[in-house]
Image (spheres, rainbow, N blue to C red):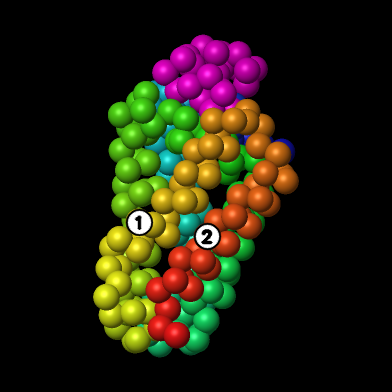
Amino acid sequence: MMNTKEKIFDVSLDLFSKKGYDSVSLREIAEEVGIKKSSIYSHYSSKEAILMDIFDYLRNLFEYDELLNNGDLDLTADNEILMENPELFYHMGSEAIKIMFSEERNLKIWKLIFIQMNHNEKIRLFFQNEILVKPLIFWKRFFSILKENGIIREDCNPELLAKEYYSFPIYLLLEICAKYDDIPESTLENFFEEAEEHANFLLDCVKVK
């Protein structure tokens, strides 16, 4: 059973993702939780503090997820999976993210970020830093290692490849979040299949034959 702080977190996330962060008041959150507005301050100092807690939750998901951090997805030339089968490397990461996305709470966070990033400065900055910049650094390093080890062509630009590699799944997520209030499971399955197909196609185009 959830405690009061967890209920505030989940109710706030649900309302933020459906109505928009700026359109939700602490009074509305309290009513949905079934407590007085003043009781929220025993757990959160402000509505913004709730939003920051949501962001921290998502950061911790990536930082401490066992599948993402078990060593198989390390970006080093010593990683045999990366060196021998970069397609499998991508697939393993994709499967880890898929499991993460299978939880409704996590999907709501992604929807909140994608739909609200142009309406709230803090959400926009989180999207820019955590959803765009950090993954692009990861994928640039991915292609740099492949290039340094002769797996992809010498004329390849790792930074441009990273942007091309990552932009397609971002587009798919934007499309899904704009289309659905409640994202169907089948749509998520299609998302991961299409994203992986695109990744494999791009990688095949630049690999040394």
Does residue 125 appear left or right of residue 202 in this picture? left
Residue 147 position in % (x across, y down): 32, 79
Does residue 45 appear left or right of residue 13 in this picture? left
Residue 177 position in % (x across, y down): 55, 35
The kind of secondary structure element at disc 1 is helix
The mark found on residue 173 in the picture is none
Q: Main secondary structure of the magenta part?
A: helix
- Quadrant containing the C terminus in the rendered view: bottom left
Q: Is residue 31 above or below residue 195?
A: above
Q: Nearer the viewer, residue 164 or 52?
A: 164
Q: Is residue 48 above or below residue 149?
A: above
Is residue 142 covered in magenta?
no
Residue 41 position in % (x across, y down): 45, 22
Is residue 26 covered in magenta?
yes
The residue at 59%/30% (across/down) is 179
Which image quadrant is residue 66 in? bottom right
Does residue 46 appear left or right of residue 194 in this picture? left
Residue 140 visible, this orientation: yes
The residue at 41%/51% (across/down) is 167
Magenta range: 12-38
Gap in angstroms between the C-alphas marked 2 and 1:
13 Å
Q: Earlier in the sequence, mark 2 or mark 1?
A: 1
- Quadrant containing the N terminus in the rendered view: top right
Q: Which residue is mark 2?
A: 198
Q: Which residue is mark 1?
A: 163
Name the kind of residue labelled 1 in the image: Lys
Estimate how packed mark 2 is, as few (under 14), some (14 to 19) or many (20 or more) residues with alpha carbons within 10 Å. Answer: some
Residue 110 visible, this orientation: no
Q: Nearer the viewer, residue 5 or 88?
A: 88
Dots 2, 1 in contact, CB < 8 A: no
